[in-house]
Amino acid sequence: MGIMLLVQIVSIVQLHWNDRRYEVDALVKAEYHKLDAAMEFLQPEWFNSRSEFLMADNLTGLLIANTAGLAIVAAGDIPDASLVPTIVEKGNGNWSMNEPRHADVLWHLQTSQGPMSAIMRVDVNPGIKAAWARTLKRIGYAVVLLLITGLAALWLVNLLVNRYFVRPTAALVNHIETWQDDSIEGQVTPKDACAGAPHLEPLAHTFSSLIAQQKKSNRQVKVKQKYLEFAAHHDPLTHLPNRLMFDDTLKQTVIDARENDSGFAVFLVDLDNFKIFNDQYGHLVGDRMVAEIGNRLRSLMRDSDLVARLDGDEFAVINTSVTERNQAEQVAKRLMEEAQLPFEYRGFTLKIAVTIGISCFPQDVTDEQQQDVTGEEIVNNASVALQEAKSNGKNQYQLFNDSMRSRLTARIRLEQDLKLALQDGQFEVWYQPKININTRKVIGSEALVRWNHPTKGYISPEVFVPVAEEAGMIIELGEWILRTACIDTQSMQSMGFDGLSVAVNISAVQFTDGNLLPMVSSAVKDSSLNPKLLELEITESAVMHDPEDVIKSLHELSRFGMRLAIDDFGTGYSSLAYLKRFPVDTLKIDRAFITDVSSDNDDVAIVEAVLGLGKHFNMKVVAEGVEDEEQLHFLKAQGCDLAQGYFISRPMSFEKYVEWIKCYGPGFQSMLEDELPTNLSGDDDIIGDLFDQVVNQ
Ligand code: C2E
Ligand code: CA
Ligand code: CA
């Protein structure tokens, strides 16, 4: 409230003050411009005394009016002394002190136009005002001077900056673009770029070298990209396109062929017995041979054909000039001849044969396939043809045909059935006993998978295991087999058959999967089986496929406490050098050598050799596929430790195995005690009797 009142009072006072000031200011300001006009008719005699006028040195305003009331006004500073008229008669000054700083003086004047009145406004405090005016004037001059010199300086600076910096820099920037662009000819040097502005030369040099560095690293990035691109699509050994590029090219070739209504052929070329070649000459020579074959295949084909290396010893060719089967045969013959030519390398004369599988488009794809064929079908066809040629004895070519197609369809169906079988629990684990030949006691069994197909009955693992391996299903299936075998074997321990071991077959695919150790250890842990009672069988060919990797895995498994066996020993061309490094407990002589061991001298030699190896490396040797007494006698005489075969027992379901063991009764002996002296061995006949008894029941 108080504040509002104060604001009101201040505004009233201000209004009043402003009003009064307004009168005077309006008078002075509004008429100032009429001073010249006033001078025209005001006669000098009106102001006859200069001294009087000088008293008005502090004159700040002047109002002159005639009697008619017509006001003619001059006001403000008198601009020019010469214009100042003299006062004719001084009127009665009417000094009013109504303002602190001004006084108004009223004069009556006699003019040529009749009497007039003048009101002069005089500053009451002239000294201060004059001093202020002088100071202001000086400040004004100073400001103007400053402005002028400032502007001049600005102009000069601008001129210099333009001349020595802006323009040379703009020129330099122009040149920098030239340095960046490789395509511009007659490149400018830093010196040229700074002509007329030498002070910029160091800068130009710095830029030039920065750009050079940038260009270099750009080039490196480009080279790297090109290399990576190349590496992603090419094989490092032969520099031929790899599988990725082959797949892409094949897809495009199919599209083109369909559009142009043309054909082509795919050749899969596989080196024969390349593993043996590698073992014989070493990997370095093996690599050179692969590169040489790659070169030869390439040289036989046109540039527009594709020659790729798909795998270690497998090449593929897409030939678009071949549209008929007989042409494909001609090409295959040429490829075979060329590949077989001797290759001189480091003093060796090397020779290798090839096997070729061929599929032609569109002949080898069915009408339904034609609609959305991707290339995969064509490679599959060629691959089936290649397998056929290999199983027919290698060093030959084979064209895909209809009988292969039906086998292929059957196989695809089998694959689909396999998937269902796992879900539906159609698999069983059977057991085949193993005995100590000397003591005739059972030491354990080998677990063998069986597929009880709902319509086809029992299917042999020799048929479905390879399919499950190729389809990747063996990982899941193998885990199930191992877990079942561990659980069954552990449950036999609780039935009182202490120390009976189990051997489980592990596929090469499981070995390379990378998850084998965790899987096996968790299966053993979950079943509470003593790991010493578990033996893992891996085939000799799987071991030799990638020996270094396998050695690592085998050591890990062996550290875990499990036993390891090499299966089908004698068929896989084991290198003795590797055998020494395998932490293997058991060698299993392949069935093929046992069958004729009583009659075939070669087989006798092989069995003796394996037994000798076993002894040397301190490994147990199991003879597989023992079918009669004679074989068993022979093996015993040779010092073979363990035997397994139809003569002892065929594989049987878990329930039957348990029954069998019970019948075997006193002859049963745990593996952990199999170091018993041989004089404790039972009668030779017992085993045959028991075999008949159990099998025929
Ligand atoms: P393998 O590991 O060599 O197994 C021995 C095979 O020889 C078994 O065939 C067995 O029934 C058979 N056999 C045993 N004694 C005799 C005999 O006295 N005479 C003859 N003629 N044969 C005998 P099976 O069970 O048909 O298995 C064949 C192959 O399938 C096995 O050969 C093995 O490579 C594979 N396989 C079997 N079960 C499994 C498994 O659980 N996992 C894996 N990965 N492969 C398995
Ligand atoms: Ca086996
Ligand atoms: Ca075997």
Image (tube, grey):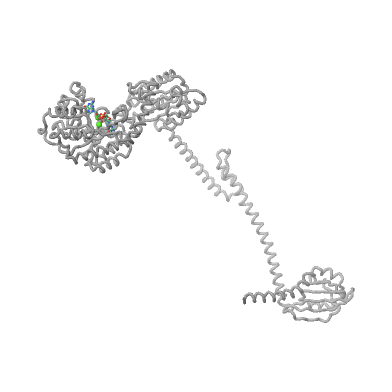
- Residue toward you, 294 or 633: 633
Q: Quadrant of the C terminus?
A: top left
Name the image quarter holding the N terminus: bottom right
Q: Quadrant of residue 138?
A: bottom right
Identify which residue, 426 or 220, lies in the foreground. 426
Q: In the rendered image of this protein, does residue 500 appear above or below residue 399? A: below
Q: Is residue 433 above or below residue 138?
A: above
Left or right, 99 with reference to 272: right
Q: Nearer the viewer, residue 40 or 323?
A: 323
Residue 469: quarter of image = top left
Q: Is residue 400 above or below residue 555?
A: above
> Number of numbered discs present?
0
Q: Is residue 52 visible?
A: yes
Residue 562: image location, x then y, percent: 23, 39
For residue 168, side relative to residue 392 (left or right): right
Determine if residue 579 is in view.
Answer: no
- Image check: 328 left or right of 137? left
Residue 47: x and y in percent read 84, 76
Percent across and percent down for residue 335 are 40, 21
Q: Quadrant of ligand 2?
A: top left
User: Residue 630: which quarter of the image?
Assistant: top left
Give coordinates of residue 97: x percent, y percent.
Answer: 75, 81
